[in-house]
Amino acid sequence: MPDERGRARGCANNSENMTTEHLFLRACLRQAVPRRPVWMMRQAGRYLPEYRATRARAGGFLNLCKTPELACEVTLQPIDLMGVDAAILFSDILVIPEAMGMELQFLEGEGPHFPNPIRNAADVAKLTDPDPEVELRYVMDALRLIRKELNGRVPLIGFTGSPWTLATYMVEGGGSKNFSTIKKMIYADPVSAHKLLERVTESVIAYLTAQVAAGAQAVQIFDTWGGILSTLDFRAFSLNYIKRIVQAVPKVGPDGQRVPVIVFVKGGGQWLEDIADTGCDVMGLDWTTDPTEARRRVGDRVAFQGNMDPCVLYAPPEVIAQRTRAMLTAFGDDPGHIANLGHGILPDIPVEHAKAFIQAAQAEIGG
Ligand code: 1CP
């Protein structure tokens, strides 16, 4: 049965003659799979009581990120507890600005905070260029340890924020409702804004290159805030830098396997062709983008990842299963779909509901 479905899904179109057994990596490269892989953005997190217990032991979120043994422990929790088909490094996008010299605080219940945000060219000039094996050594150690502990069970995804998304936090000083401070910078002082994005891009390229060397088998670029820009500004201030990263990241890992690059632009549905043009292997879609329409627009040059509204997980488990099956059907039967949510799982989702999503995605029968 699995073989039949594998054949039914057609064959690879960009495998570059390299094959892997992992469902997730195969789907990223649009190779035939016996069933679709599934994982959840933010799958290691507060909805899991086991995560909350480990974080309490660590004495805070940043300590958890900076202690490789504990970061490894929480990375593995959703593999063991939920049975997802990929692991994602436990860390945060904001460790990059911290490694570039900015003080970073995570205030309990309030999210990230930079007490001294970037506001002008002089602030940009003060940023440093981190060596990932020095300032971000704890991330590389975590990746090496996770690979060892996973022992080939599922592949390991590394990640970064996009330069634009990182810059929003660096300039706003934290989360934001209307992003007026970073928008003021791009319109009133575009030279400094581009200088900042250049510097972050260089750090991100070094960071992802080191992640691949340390064992990340795929990498995801989160552009959580690209969708707040106009088309013109998205291209100039976000897409352009994402493209440079996609082009620069090593395409093959130390084990000789292809390392797929996933680009997720939240709210990016109107720019699907532009995003596919970055040369990424996989595009993450949020729930506002129709899968059939997405495939019609970009053809078969990329795989898709997504895209159920994370709020569907508030519904009863039987509704979650129904909606998951409807999503799989909407993505169709050709290879190149990784089931996921359209954004991160929310902290107050019951564990049983998250399991209903994973199980429905893995129990798929028929196209
Ligand atoms: O209290 C806690 O335990 C902290 C909550 C938390 C967690 C679990 C934060 C703070 N970050 C994380 C982990 C995290 N962050 C992962 C882990 C891997 C996984 O399981 O998926 C990843 C991939 C991220 C990435 C991240 N951090 C993004 C991009 C993806 C997205 O969800 O949009 C963003 C924007 C952040 C910033 C951030 N870190 C934490 C919070 C609460 C936020 C959002 C702040 C805001 O509202 O703007």
Image: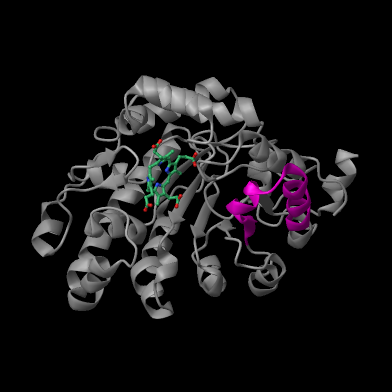
Q: Which percent across, then down, holds residue 41?
A: 54, 45
Magenta residues, as a range?
A: 302-327
Quick one: which residue is furthest to the left in this view? 122
Q: Nearer the viewer, residue 93 or 149?
A: 93
Q: Residue at x 65, y 52 (%)?
A: 312
Q: Is residue 272 above or below residue 159?
A: below
Question: Could you say which quadrant of the image residue 292 lies in?
Answer: bottom right
Quarter of the image where the N terminus is located: top right
Q: Is residue 52 above or below residue 293?
A: above
Q: With 185 as the anchor, is 245 left or right in this view?
A: right
Magenta region includes residue 248: no
Q: Which percent across, then down, holds residue 280?
A: 53, 58
Q: Is residue 96 above or below residue 133?
A: below
Quarter of the image where the C terminus is located: bottom right
| Residue 364 in view of the camera | yes
Q: Which percent across, then down, holds residue 65?
A: 36, 31
| Residue 16 in view of the camera | no
Q: Residue at x 64, y 57 (%)?
A: 303
Magenta region includes residue 307: yes
Quick one: which residue is furthest to the bottom in this view? 232
| Mark count | 0
Q: Which percent across, then down, holds residue 86?
A: 60, 37
Q: Residue at x 45, y 53 (%)?
A: 221
Quadrant of picture, ligand 1: top left
Q: Nearer the viewer, residue 353 or 254?
A: 353
Q: Nearer the viewer, residue 128 or 171?
A: 171
In this picture the colour scheme is one colour
